[in-house]
Image (spheres, rainbow, N blue to C red):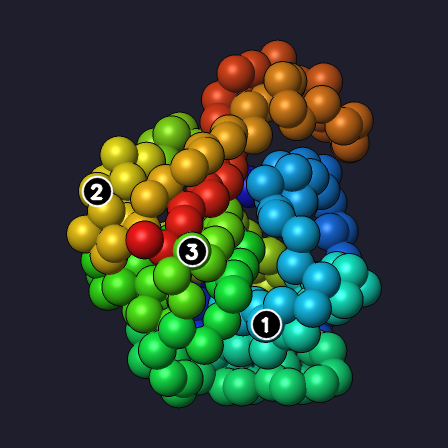
Amino acid sequence: MSEGSGLVSAREGYERWAPSYPDVAGNPLMRVEQRLMLRLCPPLAGLRVLDLACGTGRYTHLLRATGAEVVALDLSAGMLRHGPGGPRVCADMLRLPFGAAVFDAVLSGLAIGHCHDLDAWMIEAARVLRPGGTLLYSDFHCEAARAGLTRSFSDAHQRSYTLMHACHEPEAQRRAAARAQLQVSAMLEARVGIELTEPFDGSEHFYRRWHGLPLVLVVQAVRR
């Protein structure tokens, strides 16, 4: 997260970002987010998984390597063109083109903040999960947003953009999950200088200024 300009919607932003968006965890923040996600990820070999808002397929690749059967879904056709092979679907995460209870797990990395209707997102994710299935997702933390940090990027022409982000408080996420018949079983934070410690250009100043600030929230929930 950083200071940015040129506020854009998720749809527009990811179309612009797609040609240069990494299909691996390409920076310290993404790497610590991924470590926390994988810490909470149950064994998925042989199971059917939805990578919700897959981007260029960072988690799709990781999950397929474990033997999971993964369907990759994203709103951005550009992201899917630069993403993984195999089953891919271009669709809105609030209107999933699947029947009820067809996935053993739904995984979503850094995408829930692009949805303003938290209840609708939870209900739709829960709808496609079988009873006992796992929802695992991450989001940029509200405390980081309140501190003025944003999710920003530069395109191929070095124009800077900031993605719109809806701030969903952790307790609001718990309540929305409960209304969707999901039981939150774990919440982890990636905090500056605690979970996030990897050095990078300017990290000494960053860690000193923002020590203890949570940047990412990772949530695991189970379908009742």
The circle drawn on residue 132 is 3
Nearest the eye: 63 or 159: 63
Q: Residue at x 45, y 33 (%)?
A: 187
Residue denoted by label 2: 175
Tell me whether the residue at label 2 lies in contact with that at label 3, contact meaning CB atoms closer than 8 angstroms.
no
Residue type, mark 2 in image? Arg
Q: Secondary structure at mark 2?
A: helix
Report x, y in % for residue 134: 48, 54
Report x, y in % for residue 195: 64, 24
Nearest the eye: 137 or 180: 180
Residue 118 showing in the rendered view: no
Task: Please state if 132 lies on the left or on the right of 216 as rendered.
Answer: left
Q: Residue at x 71, y 85 (%)?
A: 86
The circle drawn on residue 65 is none
Residue type, mark 1 in image? Arg
The image quadrant of residue 20 is bottom right
Q: Residue at x 64, y 86 (%)?
A: 87
Identify the image quadrant of the N terminus.
Answer: top right
Q: Mark 2 and mark 3: span between their CA atoms?
A: 19 Å
Q: State which mark lies toward you, 1 or 2.
A: 1
Q: Is residue 25 above or below residue 208?
A: below
Residue type, mark 3 in image? Gly
Q: Secondary structure at mark 1?
A: strand
Residue denoted by label 1: 48
Report x, y in % for residue 9: 39, 68
Q: Mark 1 and mark 3: span between their CA atoms?
A: 13 Å
The image quadrant of residue 208 is top right
Residue 85 showing in the rendered view: yes
